[in-house]
Image: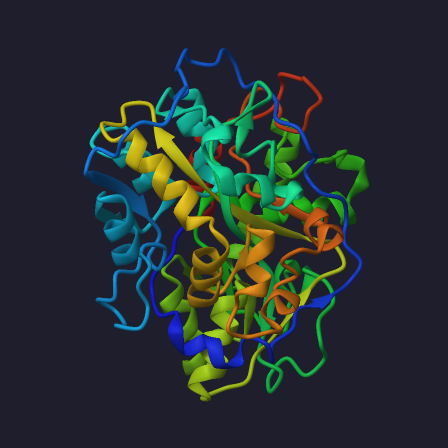
Amino acid sequence: MIRNSKFGAALAVAAALAVTLAGCSGGTGSSSTSAGSLPKVSELKTLGAGEGKLNIIVWAGYAEDGSDDPAVDWVTPFEQQTGCQVNAKTAGTSDEMVQLMRTGQYDGVSASGDATLRLIYGGDAAPVNTKLVPNYATISDFLKLKAWNSAGGTMYGIPHGWGANVLMYNPAVVTTAPDSWSAVFDKSSPYAGKITAYDSPIYIADAALYLSATDPSLGIKDPYSLTEKQLDAAVALLKTQNANIGEYWSDYTKAVEAFESGSSVIGTSWQVIANLVQADGKVEVKTVVPKEGVTGWSDTWMVSSKAKHPNCMYEWMNWITSPTVNAQVAEWFGEAPAQTKSCAETSDPAFCDTYHATDAAYAAQIHYWTTPQTTCVDGSGKTDCTAYSEWTTKWQQIKG
């Protein structure tokens, strides 16, 4: 996953932009599966005194201390309450987060599903004792014990926020509202040269999801559990799409700029990107959940297996998922909060409705990013799936 900052301007229009929910296919399943032997890493048994310091790796906007906007600060109150002084390292990609966690210099990370299993099975993340995080009890049940944040029936983190990877378009150019991902995958698309796509190996799952609906003969049941044959089919589709791509985006401020300049008119997006474009007022955009379904992301606060300040990390996980703070983060960033009680704390009363925050039926229709493993992550127990390392190689081939 790749993110950048520019959040606050979107808030005034967040409620005005609703995602149109079309018929979607099923989710990724409810339980975690093994991708091999779990490293022997112990969880914290009891919560002790804070160590006075906390080093964390974060997505931009997840640890605001007032330096970007004096009115947006949930780090300073945490420091005052716990005595844990926060050193937040902003990462630009999931790959960067994984590499930073492997140095052993950080206590935790706000990881997305395309990084979590790499950290778990690489021995870089510790299982989390949820009893030591009181606010975990009222986090949405549909985010607990999932394939991307647990293993062996144990949580390896505390859910933070989530969202869908929607299809965004400029209605001034795309005059017929799209209801299918064929708008970006059809090789004869009328928008060739102005299609945008997410720049990451995990985007292969979007092609796989589309193929699961349009080519049933492939037998794709889960977009993150692909055999060699299924992966090759998704790669072939993406190589064809590559000829029509105007720009791949990773830094989402560039996605905003591309739509505002007109160099992009349709493609994969996040709701927060649409909010930012609308807030700037240069062009109009709309978002839709196509009939084939969507992929999505759920971020998880994970504890490093080498954490030097584990007690402060547990204090932070409980703080960041408290009702008021989780609401502040969700509104600032533009995502659904994981904490169910946050919906009563948002400044915009319609915010949780806009982001479907407590809508389990909506959430179940999203195929959340889950790191591909050779042991399929669909719960089948099969071992003929392709790993993320192979997806990375294929992605490089797709882009040329």
Compared to residue 312, the image places residue 257 above or below, namely below
- Say how many tags the image has: 0
- Residue lying at 30% horizontally and 63% vertically, measured from the top left: 73
Give 169 or 57, whichever is nearer the viewer. 57
- Horizontal and vertical percent for residue 279? 46, 83
Q: Name the colouring of the figure.
A: rainbow
Residue 257 seen from this side = no
Task: State which quadrant residue 132 falls in.
Answer: top left
Side of 108 relative to 127 (left or right): left
Quadrant for residue 234, please give it: top right
Residue name at image x 23 percent, y 40 percent: 55
| Residue 192, placed above or below residue 250 | below
Tell me which residue sits at (24%, 50%) in the image. 79
In-front residue for pair 186/34:
34
Measured as percent of width and height from the top left, residue 257 is found at 38, 75
Q: Which residue: 45% across, 24% down?
A: 127
Q: Is residue 28 visible?
A: yes
Give the vertical position of 321 relative to 123 (above or below). Answer: below
Q: Position of residue 245 (x, y in %)?
A: 49, 62
The picture places residue 400, in percent across and down from the top left corner, at: 40, 47
